[in-house]
Image (cartoon, grey):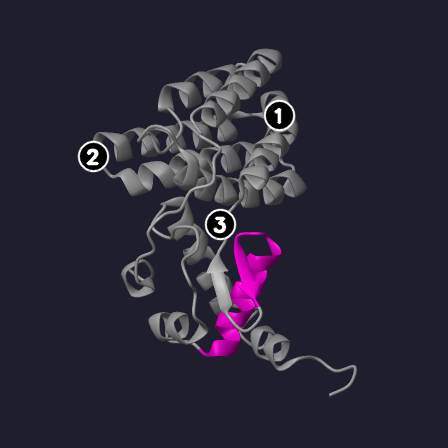
Amino acid sequence: MSGGVSETTMEAAGDRGGTRAEAIHRDIVRAILEQRLGPGTKLGEDEVGAIYGVSRTIVRAALQSLAHEGIVVIEKNRGAFVAHPSVKEAAEVFQARRLIEPAITELAARVCDGAGAAMLRAHLAEEKAAERDGDDRAAIRLSGEFHVVLARIAGHRVYENFLRELVARSSLIILLYRRSRSQCCKTDHHTALVEAIVAGRGAEAVAMMTNHLDEIERDLELVDTAVPVKPLSELLGG
């Protein structure tokens, strides 16, 4: 239909605001943050649809949204795959994080109130509990989400949206290029950051964040590599 709305758009729009597509989007991002879904994993529309009990149109809307964020790559005649960041892309992601996260941290230190402090400390408690319980997947996800929580407390929606994408892409990068088996940020670093932010010590918190990001990147060996790909049915919906 010339000038009309596509079938994908119409079904997604009629899907109570795209809630099913959004739920698939969130679940795939969560699987990436937990490093269950690795770079290069094929996200077949039929298979994803069967896992979630939805149509290919809904799946396509979710995958297109993920592709827009650089988390998924859609290749003509081949389908959708979890992105496999190149060495150049990995360096660019951390360059971008070093540009926006100090600004987020400074702003968070300036505006953090009692509710913000409680949110940060509750998140830290979840991180520590996951580590204590040996729940590596949760610990990995929570360590990445900590950075997004900071942006939420800063009250900067644009930064928060950018950072959410960068954190998901960072998880793929860490899975591909990490030197050690450490898969997430150190909670003691996060604890020190929270204390500086809650106390309003912005300059100190910014320096900590910069050093923190530098340390994460130093643990990467930025050379081309590959990871084994498991069946999708083992990685989603569980």
Q: Tell me which segment is drawn in magenta.
A: 55-75
- In the rendered structure, which amino acid carries the disc numbered 3? His
Would residue 178 appear left or right of 161 to someone viewing this image? Answer: left
Element under disc 3: loop
Residue on which disc 3 sits = 84
Where's residue 203, x and y in %?
62, 12
Dots 1, 2 in contact, CB < 8 A: no
- In the rendered structure, which amino acid carries the disc numbered 2? Asp
What numbered label is drawn on residue 111?
1
Which of the 4 image quarters holds residue 4? bottom right
Determine whether 56 is above or below 152 in the image: below
Residue 56 in magenta? Answer: yes
- In the rendered structure, which amino acid carries the disc numbered 1? Val
Determine whether 3 is above or below 200 in the image: below
Would residue 192 appear left or right of 106 to someone viewing this image? Answer: left
Where's residue 109, x and y in %?
59, 21
Magenta-colored segment: predominant secondary structure = helix
Q: Residue at x 50, y 65 (%)?
A: 80
Element under disc 2: loop
Q: Residue at x 45, y 44 (%)?
A: 172
- Residue farthest along the front direction in this orientation: 224
Where's residue 61, x and y in %?
55, 69
Residue on which disc 2 sits = 133
| Observer-nearest of 171 and 229 | 229
Determine whether 57 is above or below 211 in the image: below
Residue 120 in magenta? Answer: no
What numbered label is drawn on residue 76?
none
**Of callouts 1 and 3, the N-terminal one:** 3
Cα distance in 3D space between marks 1 and 3:
37 Å
